[in-house]
Image (spheres, rainbow, N blue to C red):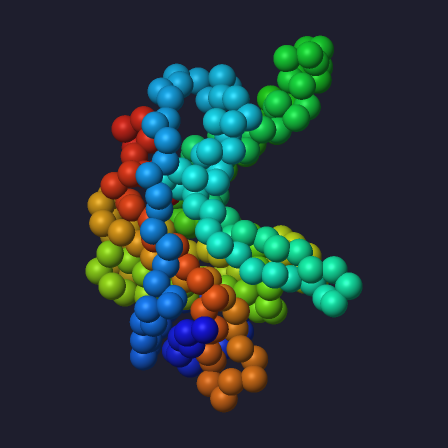
Amino acid sequence: MLGLRLLPAAIVFAAMFAGKLAGVRDAKSQEPARPQEAPQQKEITDWREWTSDDCLQVLRSSPWAQTVAGEWSGNDDMQVYAPRTVQFRSALPIRQALARRMLLANHYDQLDAAGRAILDRQVEENLQQDFRDTIVIRISGGTGQGPTAVLQTPDGKRYISQRTVIVQSYPNPIEFEVIFGRLKADGTPRLPPEGEIRIFFGWMNPKAKSPTMRVTGGVTFDLSRMMYRGKFEY
């Protein structure tokens, strides 16, 4: 595994912190997976027409999500293999796919007016979330304590997540969200609508003499593919 040496300010993974990584060395074995060519996506005007398969493609293999090789977790009695899925939860298509899956799971078309109204409110709250200041990425699968992630922008700079939120913890396959600022210090967008970004994921090593991130994998996203209905969505 590749070790990333962090700046002194980034000591505890759960704290609110930000900054570039210093003294980072790339390792060939840790090159992030590159997205495979996804099947041609259908042009659907209304996301409410998406099928379950459409939703799964958006959530697992799309410009805003990737599923890559994972790792084993558990104990001697039970081992579970969990592939890694990385999603831009702040991107509208991801949130629409999640909303559509909820409607399908609750048999929306078979509900009465009152039941539909309840789901409509929940969907609207999800789709109207404000991500003007943040980029939220969910990473699932894998093991380890103190999970976190690093974002490498097209200019080669690397940033540790500002905040990590644990959604599901060990001994289950870990699921967590990492949050990055959408704007740089000078007020310009952190991500341009072209180029490639890399997301390295791993965990903080509490036994290291200085703050160190142990990288267990990574993925590469093509920003030019993140246009959705005329808007750069991430």
View extreme (right): residue: 77
The residue nearer to you, when weighing 36 against 173, is 36
Specify the quadrant of the image occupied by residue 159.
bottom left
In the depicted structure, whether residue 117 falls above or below residue 229 = above
Instruction: Classify the position of the C terminus by image quarter.
Output: top left
The residue nearer to you, when weighing 156 against 54, is 54
In the depicted structure, whether residue 127 falls above or below residue 164 = above
Q: In the image, what residue occupies the spot 37% across and 59% down?
A: 32
Residue 104's spot in the image, x, y percent? 62, 23
Q: In the image, what residue occupies the spot 36% across and 36% down?
A: 38
The residue nearer to you, when weighing 71 against 138, is 71
Instruction: Classify the position of the N terminus by image quarter.
Output: bottom left
Q: Is residue 90 visible from the viewing direction of this image? A: no
**Left or right relative to 191: residue 134:** right
Residue 203's spot in the image, x, y percent? 52, 69
Residue 34's spot in the image, x, y percent? 34, 51
**Left or right relative to 188: residue 203:** right
